Image: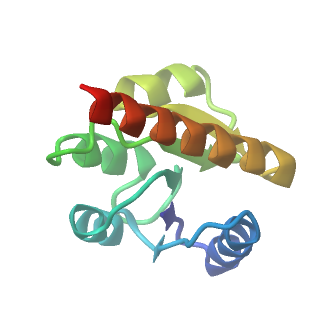
Amino acid sequence: MIVDDNPTMVEMLSMALNIFGHNALAAYSGEEALEQIPKADLDLVLLDLTMPGIDGYETLRRLRSLPDTERLPVYVITAAAELDLEENIRLAGGNGLLRKPIQMETLADLVEANARAEVVGASQRSAA
Protein backbone atom coordinates (compact mmCIF):
# COMPACT_ATOMS: atom_id res chain seq x y z
CA MET A 1 0.00 0.00 0.00
CA ILE A 2 1.14 3.49 -0.82
CA VAL A 3 -0.05 6.22 1.53
CA ASP A 4 0.62 9.71 0.21
CA ASP A 5 -1.48 12.83 -0.31
CA ASN A 6 0.37 13.57 -3.55
CA PRO A 7 -1.41 11.74 -6.44
CA THR A 8 1.68 12.03 -8.65
CA MET A 9 3.81 10.25 -6.06
CA VAL A 10 1.17 7.55 -5.62
CA GLU A 11 0.98 7.02 -9.39
CA MET A 12 4.77 6.88 -9.79
CA LEU A 13 5.23 4.40 -6.94
CA SER A 14 2.26 2.31 -8.14
CA MET A 15 3.75 2.05 -11.63
CA ALA A 16 7.13 1.06 -10.19
CA LEU A 17 5.59 -1.63 -7.99
CA ASN A 18 3.62 -2.95 -10.98
CA ILE A 19 6.86 -3.17 -12.97
CA PHE A 20 8.36 -5.15 -10.07
CA GLY A 21 5.41 -7.55 -10.32
CA HIS A 22 3.29 -6.30 -7.41
CA ASN A 23 -0.16 -4.76 -7.16
CA ALA A 24 -0.35 -1.51 -5.23
CA LEU A 25 -3.25 -0.20 -3.22
CA ALA A 26 -3.43 3.55 -2.68
CA ALA A 27 -4.57 5.70 0.20
CA TYR A 28 -4.39 9.48 -0.01
CA SER A 29 -4.46 10.17 3.74
CA GLY A 30 -3.61 8.52 7.00
CA GLU A 31 -7.28 8.18 7.81
CA GLU A 32 -7.98 6.41 4.51
CA ALA A 33 -5.05 4.05 5.06
CA LEU A 34 -6.27 3.13 8.54
CA GLU A 35 -9.70 2.30 7.10
CA GLN A 36 -8.24 0.10 4.33
CA ILE A 37 -5.44 -1.72 6.15
CA PRO A 38 -7.62 -4.05 8.27
CA LYS A 39 -9.48 -5.15 5.11
CA ALA A 40 -6.40 -5.66 2.92
CA ASP A 41 -3.80 -8.41 2.70
CA LEU A 42 -0.66 -6.29 2.56
CA ASP A 43 3.01 -7.17 2.19
CA LEU A 44 4.39 -3.68 2.70
CA VAL A 45 3.30 -0.09 3.40
CA LEU A 46 5.05 2.98 2.00
CA LEU A 47 3.90 5.86 4.20
CA ASP A 48 4.43 9.56 3.53
CA LEU A 49 5.46 11.47 6.62
CA THR A 50 3.97 14.88 5.82
CA MET A 51 0.24 14.77 5.07
CA PRO A 52 -2.74 16.92 6.00
CA GLY A 53 -4.94 15.52 8.75
CA ILE A 54 -3.00 12.94 10.70
CA ASP A 55 0.65 12.86 9.70
CA GLY A 56 2.77 9.80 9.03
CA TYR A 57 3.91 9.44 12.64
CA GLU A 58 0.35 9.38 13.99
CA THR A 59 -0.79 7.10 11.16
CA LEU A 60 2.04 4.73 12.02
CA ARG A 61 1.22 4.73 15.75
CA ARG A 62 -2.45 4.02 15.04
CA LEU A 63 -1.58 1.38 12.44
CA ARG A 64 0.55 -0.46 14.99
CA SER A 65 -2.39 -0.54 17.40
CA LEU A 66 -4.52 -2.42 14.84
CA PRO A 67 -4.77 -6.21 15.17
CA ASP A 68 -2.26 -8.28 13.17
CA THR A 69 -0.07 -5.36 12.05
CA GLU A 70 2.96 -5.90 14.27
CA ARG A 71 4.80 -7.77 11.48
CA LEU A 72 3.62 -5.58 8.59
CA PRO A 73 6.69 -3.76 7.20
CA VAL A 74 6.12 0.00 7.12
CA TYR A 75 8.65 2.30 5.49
CA VAL A 76 8.30 6.05 5.76
CA ILE A 77 8.89 8.07 2.60
CA THR A 78 9.83 11.71 3.02
CA ALA A 79 11.97 14.60 1.88
CA ALA A 80 12.07 15.93 5.46
CA ALA A 81 15.43 16.50 7.04
CA GLU A 82 14.43 16.74 10.69
CA LEU A 83 16.83 15.88 13.47
CA ASP A 84 16.55 12.28 14.70
CA LEU A 85 14.26 11.37 11.78
CA GLU A 86 15.20 7.69 11.67
CA GLU A 87 14.97 7.35 15.45
CA ASN A 88 11.53 9.02 15.50
CA ILE A 89 10.32 6.67 12.76
CA ARG A 90 11.58 3.65 14.70
CA LEU A 91 9.94 4.86 17.92
CA ALA A 92 6.61 5.29 16.10
CA GLY A 93 6.83 1.68 14.86
CA GLY A 94 8.37 2.09 11.42
CA ASN A 95 10.80 -0.33 9.85
CA GLY A 96 12.83 2.18 7.91
CA LEU A 97 13.09 5.28 5.77
CA LEU A 98 13.12 6.00 2.04
CA ARG A 99 14.16 9.53 1.20
CA LYS A 100 12.49 11.42 -1.63
CA PRO A 101 13.29 11.50 -4.44
CA ILE A 102 13.08 7.73 -4.23
CA GLN A 103 15.60 5.81 -6.28
CA MET A 104 13.85 3.01 -8.14
CA GLU A 105 16.74 0.60 -7.54
CA THR A 106 16.45 1.23 -3.79
CA LEU A 107 12.69 0.65 -3.94
CA ALA A 108 13.16 -2.55 -5.94
CA ASP A 109 15.69 -3.85 -3.41
CA LEU A 110 13.35 -3.02 -0.52
CA VAL A 111 10.37 -4.75 -2.13
CA GLU A 112 12.46 -7.80 -3.01
CA ALA A 113 13.95 -8.06 0.50
CA ASN A 114 10.50 -7.90 2.08
CA ALA A 115 9.09 -10.44 -0.39
CA ARG A 116 11.92 -12.85 0.47
CA ALA A 117 11.36 -12.29 4.19
CA GLU A 118 7.65 -13.05 3.78
CA VAL A 119 8.37 -16.29 1.89
CA VAL A 120 10.87 -17.38 4.56
CA GLY A 121 8.44 -16.45 7.33
CA ALA A 122 5.60 -18.36 5.67
CA SER A 123 7.73 -21.49 5.23
CA GLN A 124 8.88 -21.33 8.86
CA ARG A 125 5.26 -20.95 10.04
CA SER A 126 4.25 -23.96 7.90
CA ALA A 127 7.04 -26.07 9.35
CA ALA A 128 5.98 -25.32 12.92
Q: Is residue 99 above or below residue 102?
A: above
Measuring from the top left, give residue 69's x and y in whole percent. Answer: 26, 44
Q: Is residue 119 above or below residue 87?
A: below
Q: Nearer the viewer, residue 114 or 84?
A: 114
Residue 7, image quadrant: bottom right
Q: Residue shown at 23%/69% (left/top)?
A: 39
Residue 125, image quadrant: top left
Give the number of marks: 0
Q: Is residue 45 above or below residue 117?
A: below
Measuring from the top left, give residue 70's x and y in whole percent. Answer: 27, 35
Measuring from the top left, give residue 22's x and y in whole percent. Answer: 61, 67
Q: Is residue 14 above or below residue 46?
A: below
Q: Residue shown at 53%/54% (left/top)?
A: 50
Q: Nearer the viewer, residue 126 or 99?
A: 126
Residue 86, image quadrant: top right
Q: Nearer the viewer, residue 105 or 46?
A: 105
| Display colour scheme | rainbow
Q: Is residue 110 left or right of residue 49?
A: right
Q: Residue shown at 67%/45% (left/top)?
A: 112
Q: Is residue 108 left or right of residue 63?
A: right
| Quadrant for the C terminus in the image | top left
Q: Is residue 12 left or right of residue 120?
A: right
Q: Is residue 85 left or right of residue 65?
A: right
Measuring from the top left, give residue 27's x and y in whole percent. Answer: 44, 73
Q: Residue shown at 56%/32% (left/top)?
A: 96
- Outermost residue toward the front in this view: 127
